[in-house]
Image (cartoon, grey):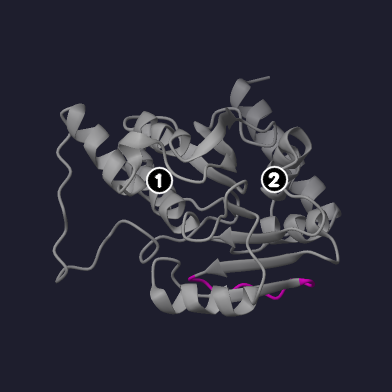
Amino acid sequence: MSKRWYQDNRRDAWRRIARSKGYRTRSAYKLKQIQERFGIIRRGDAVLDVGCHPGGWVQVAVEEAGEEGLVIGVDLLATSPVDGASIIIGDISEEDTITRINQTLGERELNVVVSDISPNLTGRYDTDQTISLELSTLVLDAAMEFIPPGGSFVTKIFQGTGIEGLVTAARDRFSNVQRYSPTASRSASSETYLICQNRLPQPKGGARGKSASEQVHNHLSELGIVVEEESDEVESKVGFHLIKKREEE
């Protein structure tokens, strides 16, 4: 029995379990396992899921937050309605989307931002890992617009060059940052999740006045990696615009 067969069969098992329980994706069990380990979402919490399509994490967030909670999902792709959640079609980096999120929140503050967003994998690991790093950093910067002191943040990351810069940026903003790999992830996958709890009232000294993106770019420069800034006249190929999350993730 080959290792590849075992890994594929294990992956399919999680998909079968998810479907049998009414979840849209197997990745729902990744958030369930994160929740079981860290208790990120509490009853009554307001939760934002960035890159929510097709809705598996939104479903879990609704269950965990309960009737008193508020769950908002945002994605460029249209996502079928989820009972108990508000779905917004938009780009989290654009002001119009942020305005709609704030309108949905009303007088409430977000307690948690989660994101399972992933690049459309090309099969070229360096390319995929770089795009994933950009996405995760973009989501962290967006999350900092919403999360109050004491709040939590979870995002997917792929291990590789530059990832320590993102981890440092997170540790400058949260008192407790850990990496965690759910058993529902594929054994062969390099994905893991950055679990950030208890947002600090202010970033630590060196991070004050800097975005996470600036910190990661500086880290890459220190590694001797040239980070090219793209012209405003050229549509970015890194970010939410040309990326969509694979359902099987």
Where residue 96 appears, x then y in whole percent? 43, 79
Q: Residue at x 49, y 78 (%)?
A: 99
Q: Earlier in the sequence, mark 2 or mark 1?
A: 2
Q: Nearer the viewer, residue 136 or 219?
A: 219
Mark seen at residue 31? 2
Where residue 204 appears, x then y in whole percent? 40, 36
Q: Residue at x 76, y 55 (%)?
A: 60
Instruction: Report the residue marked by disc 1.
Output: 132
**Residue 73 falls in image quadrant:** bottom right
Q: Residue at x 56, y 74 (%)?
A: 102
Q: Label the magenta part by its dominant secondary structure.
A: loop
Q: Nearer the viewer, residue 54 or 209?
A: 209
Q: Say whether residue 32 is left or right of residue 163.
A: right
Query: Is 175 placed above or below 40 here?
Result: above
Residue 229 shows in this picture: yes
Q: Which residues are magenta?
A: 76-84
Q: Residue at x 18, y 34 (%)?
A: 221
The amino acid type found where label 1 is placed reads: Ser
- On whether residue 121 falls in the magenta region, the answer is no
The amino acid type found where label 2 is placed reads: Leu
Instruction: Assess disc 2: are there few (<14), some (14-19) or many (≥20) residues with their C-alpha within 10 Å of its C-alpha.
Output: many
